[in-house]
Image (cartoon, rainbow, N blue to C red):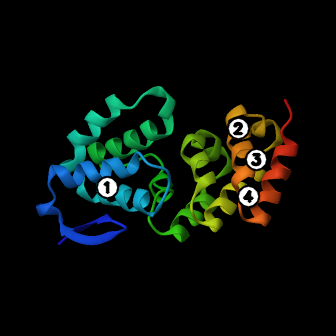
Amino acid sequence: MDCVNLDKSNYEIIEISKVDDKIIKKLIDNLKLDLSDNFFISFESLIKLGKKAESALESVIHEIDDHHQFKKEIFNLLLNFIKNNKIENPLLLNLYHPDFIVRANALMQIEKNNALKNLNFILPLISDPDDSVRWAVMRLLDSLDPSEKQNTIIFKKLKKQVDVEQNPVIQKKIKKILKSITF
């Protein structure tokens, strides 16, 4: 019996056969929010729902405007996985796993070449709720060649995060990376 978690405040486990459109909509709505436990649990739940969530995911993709490109990429990743039951880089799914250890390990396993190719999935984790995941992102970004760091998207994300980062070790790493980026 496969089950799906509903949300953090109500860790209700429901048999997949009993999941209705209302629950699927709630899971999808959680993906529209910032990264949080609810986001990661909903991501995993939608993967488990598979074909049952396909049409709802398709309709949401068309509603998302271009200003929310990350969200659109996430929905496309989920939809492509559900439709094809495979993915080019399985580590991408692990980037949004509910377990922060799995997310951090996925970041450490992503090769530098794949990092640039999958930057749109990696950069949002700069604001992950867990310090170890944010640290893994910083280490990955710091490992890039100087020319590869010359990316305005990386710069903007880091510049935004440095002001809100509460972990002084991560904040110091962000400042180091920002200093290495020159335009």
What amino acid type is highlighted by mark number 3? Leu
Q: Is residue 43 left or right of residue 158?
A: left
Residue in the picture at 21% in, 39% down: 55
Question: Residue 156 got which mark?
Answer: 2
- Nearest to the eye among marks 3 and 4: give it: 4
- Residue at 23%, 48% in the rendered image: 53
- Give the percent coordinates (x, y) of residue 118: 57, 43
Label 1, secondary structure: give it.
Answer: helix
Q: CA distance from mark 1 to mark 4?
A: 28 Å
**Image quarter hosting the C terminus:** top right
Other-residue count near label 2 (Cα within 10 Å), few / some / many at <14 / 14–19 / ≥20? few
User: What separation in Å lies between label 1 and label 2 (alpha carbons)?
Assistant: 31 Å
Mark whose residue sits in front, 1 or 2? 2
Residue where numbered disc 1 is placed:
47
Quadrant that contains the N terminus? bottom left
Depth check: give the residue in front, 153 or 38: 38
The residue type indicated by label 2 comes to Lys
Instruction: Answer few, some or many: residues within 10 Å of disc 3's Cα (few below 14, many 20 plus, some between 14 and 19).
Output: some
Tell whether label 2 touches label 1 (CB within 8 Å): no
Pick whichever of labels 2 and 4 is earlier in the sequence. 4
* Circle 3 residue: 144
| Residue 112 x %, y % | 68, 49
First-in-chain label (3 vs 2): 3
Of marks 3 and 4, which one's residue comes earlier in the chain? 4
Residue at the location (71% across, 57% down)?
A: 165
Q: Residue tagged by mark 4?
A: 139
Specify the quadrant of the image occupied by residue 43: bottom left
Of marks 1 and 4, which one's residue comes earlier in the chain?
A: 1
Q: Residue at x 48, y 59 (%)?
A: 36
